[in-house]
Image (tube, helix red, strand yellow):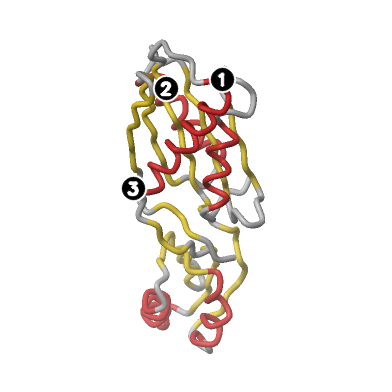
Amino acid sequence: MTYQTLAAPVTARLDIKKSEFITYAYPVHSREKAMFHVEQLRETYPDARHHCWAYIIGDPNNTTSAGFDDDGEPNGTAGRPILNVLQHKSIGNVIIIVVRYFGGIKLGAGGLTRAYAGSAQAAVDEMVLTPYVPMAQVKIEADFANESQVRYVVEDMGGEVGEVAYSKAVTLNVTLPEADIETLKERLGMDGRVLEQVENEVDED
């Protein structure tokens, strides 16, 4: 599963026939987070005529979750064009929201479609894109004497040690790239064993 995702939020502005289009793009990992940004912008721009958006959660080439909303614009003239730009550019785990202030001149269906696609493209042009790396959480059990070696191996592989529990042995909750789990098991050897893969870090609902 290889695709590009947004490194940091961006914004862009276009003025088209006196209407102002303010575009925001955010990296997101769930629909709930995407909708949080929509509601946030509704509060920031309460007097705007439309808040149109589209998001893709997961791989844009094999979409597990996507959505869009025209927010009162004619059907198919806002959300779908924004989504099309994201799919065409193969950008996942992202939402683009376009806030429109109506300037008094109607653009027509074709004009609106171009305006919203252009607004989305303007945001894409500002993006710094990075390859998406699926992360996984695993539990590792080790003897007390081997804890420091386990930590070293995990961090050397670009992983991160989270919660640690101490009882008869040490149980470490670790986050690392999903593709590296088998390598982790090999490198740990007798120093520790991977008990289970807890969950994928990305919320795909």
Q: Could you tell which of marks 1 and 3 lies nearer the N-terminus?
A: 1
As drawn, is 87 to the left or to the right of 118? right
Type of amino acid at the residue the image marks with label 2: Arg
Task: Please say if 8 is above or below 15.
Answer: below
For the N terminus, the quadrant is bottom right
Image mark for residue 171? none
The percent position of residue 129, horizontal first and vertical second, equals: 40, 57
Element on which disc 3 rests: helix
Closer-to-camera residue (28/180): 28
Element on which disc 2 rests: strand
Closer-to-camera residue (111/203): 111
- Spatial separation of the CA atoms under disc 1 and disc 3: 25 Å
Residue 146 location, quadrant: bottom left
* Crowd class of label 2 (few under 14; some 14 to 19; many from 20; radius 10 Å): many
Residue 20 location, quadrant: top left
Task: Please say if 191 is above or below 203.
Answer: below
As drawn, is 26 to the left or to the right of 88? left
Element on which disc 1 rests: loop
* Crowd class of label 1 (few under 14; some 14 to 19; many from 20; radius 10 Å): some
The percent position of residue 14, horizontal first and vertical second, equals: 35, 31
The residue indicated by pointer 3 is 126
Closer-to-camera residue (59/40): 59
Q: Could you tell which of marks 2 and 3 lies nearer the N-terminus?
A: 2
The residue indicated by pointer 2 is 100
Type of amino acid at the residue the image marks with label 3: Glu
The residue indicated by pointer 1 is 73
Residue lying at 53% horizontally and 88% vertically, measured from the top left: 189
Residue lying at 53% horizontally and 47% vertically, measured from the top left: 86
Q: Could you tell which of marks 2 and 1 lies nearer the N-terminus?
A: 1
Closer-to-camera residue (55/18): 18
Task: Please say if 186 is above or below 104.
Answer: below
- Spatial separation of the CA atoms under disc 2 and disc 3: 19 Å
